[in-house]
Amino acid sequence: DIQMTQSPSSLSASVGDRVTITCRASQTIANYLNWYQQKPGKAPKSLIFGVSNLQNWVPSRFSGSGSGTDFTLTISSLQPEDFATYYCQQSYSLPRTFGQGTTVEVK
Amino acid sequence: QVQLQESGPGLVKPSGTLSLTCAVSGFSIGDNHWWGWVRQSPGKGLEWIGETSHSGSTNYNPSLQSRLTISVDTSKNHFSLHLTSLTAADTAVYYCARKMTFAFDIWGQGTVVTVSS
C-alpha cells in the first residue's frame, strides 16, 4: 500500500493567514493526488483533483501543487469557513489511501 | 443536482452482515463512472473501502476483501455494500461517493453504523 503522510497534523491560524499543508507519498503517484475538506459531523467535500484542478465550487484562494511524491495544498488567505480538517488521497494505485488529516484551527 | 443517499441499519450485531445501499439521484449510475464507499471510525481518518464501475467491475481494499461485496443495480440507480463477519472495528460512519476523473467528487451525507450486541 502507498502510505500518505500529511504535515502538520494540526495548525493554528488566523483569518487572512496563508496556510500550507503538505502531503508526502511513500512512492511516486504521478499526478493522482486529491484533496478533501471535512467539517465536524459532515461528509468530506472534494476540493482539488489531479494535484491542482479545483472543483468548480471551490474558491480560488485554494490551490494545489507538486508532483511525484510531494504535494501541497495552499490557502492564500484563510477565511472563517476554512477552519476544518483536510485530507489528501492518492488514486494512483489500489488501495486508494488517504493521509491522516490536517486540522486547521483558530489561533 | 447530483445527490447520493446512504441507507441501512444503524445497529448490527457482532458476526453479522452489514448491508448498505446508496441511492443516486440527478445522475444515471449507468453513465460510465465509478462509485465507491469510504468509512470513518469514531475520531479517526478516512478509509477507502472499495468501488464499483457502472458495469459491475470492482476494486476492494485488501484489508476487507474477504468480507466485502460491492454491487451496482442500474435499474434502481443505486449501488450497495455488503460486509460480513462484523466486529466492533467496523463501527464507523459509512459514506458513498461518485468518482469523477481521479477523485470522489460528490458524497452522501454518511450513515452511522454501530456493531454491538
Image: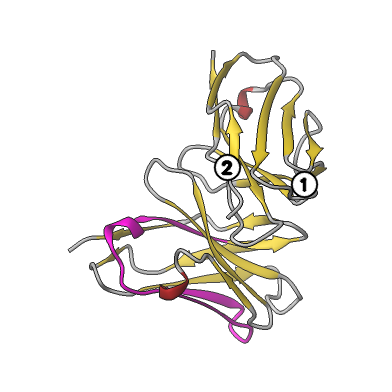
Start and end of the magenta stretch? B68-96
Mark 2 or mark 1, which is nearer to you? 2
Please identify the quadrant where the C terminus of chain B is shown: bottom left
In this orientation, which residue lies closer to the viewer: B60 or A60?
B60
Please report, as a chain letter, where disc 1 is located.
A
Image vertical order of residue A32 relative to residue A106, above or below: below
Q: Which amino acid does label 1 sit on?
A: Gln
| Left or right side of B93 for B98 | right
Q: Mark 1 points at which residue?
A: A55
Where is residue A38 drawn, in percent x and y?
56, 40
Please identify the quadrant where the N terminus of chain B is shown: bottom right
Can you tell which mark lies on residue A99? 2
Assess whether mark 1 and mark 2 are in contact (beta carbons under 8 angstroms): no
Seen at 57% across and 42% down, the residue is A99
Where is residue B104 drawn, in percent x and y?
66, 56
Under tag 1, what secondary structure?
loop
Can you tell which mark lies on residue A45? none
Where is residue A3 drawn, in percent x and y?
58, 46
Figure quadrant of residue B48: bottom right
Q: Does the magenta run of residues contain B87?
A: yes
In this orientation, which residue lies closer to the viewer: A107 or B4?
A107
Seen at 73% across and 71% down, the residue is B33
Q: Do labels 2 and 1 share a chain?
A: yes
In 3D space, how far apart are the residues under numbered discs 2 and 1 (Cα atoms)?
Answer: 20 Å
The answer to whether residue B38 is visible is yes
Q: Does the magenta run of residues contain A55?
A: no
In this orientation, which residue lies closer to the viewer: A61 or B45?
B45
